[in-house]
Image (cartoon, grey):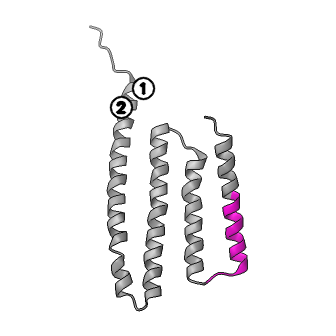
Amino acid sequence: MNIKLPDTDQLFGRFLELLVNILILYIIVILAIGLVKTITGVQALIGAASFSQGFSIVVTDILTFLVIIELFKGFVDYFKAKRFSLHSMLDPTILFVIRELIVTLYRQQIEWVNLLSFAALILSMGICRTLAVKYSPN
């Protein structure tokens, strides 16, 4: 009797596709929870001691949510293309650095050295992203 085993590459591909679909559903649930949390952050604005303090909390929450969206978008792009692309990983990193810059500027706790460091970091990541897009293998 000759028993034919399933093709392991095909079996692995189907299993990986199932895992990716579960992860994408999980990401959607996390984003929905994050959106609800961000929207309910209005309570922090209302209940804060001062408007500027509450506004700072709300702005930080919104910017953090945008970074998370970009990060998950990079993951989903990876799942679709089955490879990491440098520019899709640099996008959330650039957004995170800009978020940190905005939060630091808003709190007015920045020195010129830190501001220059942020500028150099954003410029270098922007150049890397531009080169990654220009010299993409596709």
Q: Are marks 2 and 1 in contact (CB under 8 Å)?
A: no
Tell whether position 117 is magenta. yes
Disc 2 on helix, strand or loop? helix
**Which amino acid does the dot numbered 2 rest on?**
Arg
Asked which quadrant contains residue 40, the reply is bottom left
* Residue placed furthest toward the bottom: 49
Quadrant of the image for the C terminus?
A: top right
Q: Residue at x 47, y 86 (%)?
A: 52
Decide whether the magenta segment is chiefly helix, strand or loop. helix
Determine which residue is flagged by label 1. Answer: 9
Residue drawn at the location 65% of the way across and 45% of the way down? 132
Query: With 85 as the anchor, is 131 left or right in this view?
Result: right
Q: Which residues are magenta?
A: 109-124
Cα distance between the residues tagged 2 and 1: 9 Å
Q: Left or right: where does residue 117 sit relative to residue 103?
A: right
**Mark 2 crowd level (few <14, some 14–19, many ≥20, 10 Å Cα):** few
Residue 133 is inside the magenta segment: no
Disc number placed over residue 14 in the picture, else none = 2
Instruction: Please give left or right for residue 105 compared with residue 73 in the image.
Output: right
Q: Residue furthest left?
A: 1
Residue 8 drawn at (x, y percent): 39, 25
> Closest to the observer: 2 or 54?
54
Q: Is residue 6 above or below residue 23?
A: above
The residue drawn where x is 64% and y is 39% is 136
The answer to whether 69 is drawn above or below residue 5 in the figure is: below
Tell me the SS state at disc 1. helix
25 left or right of 52 in image: left
Q: Which amino acid is tagged 1? A: Asp
Residue 128 rendering spot, x and y as whole percentages: 68, 52
Q: Is residue 80 above or below residue 30?
A: above
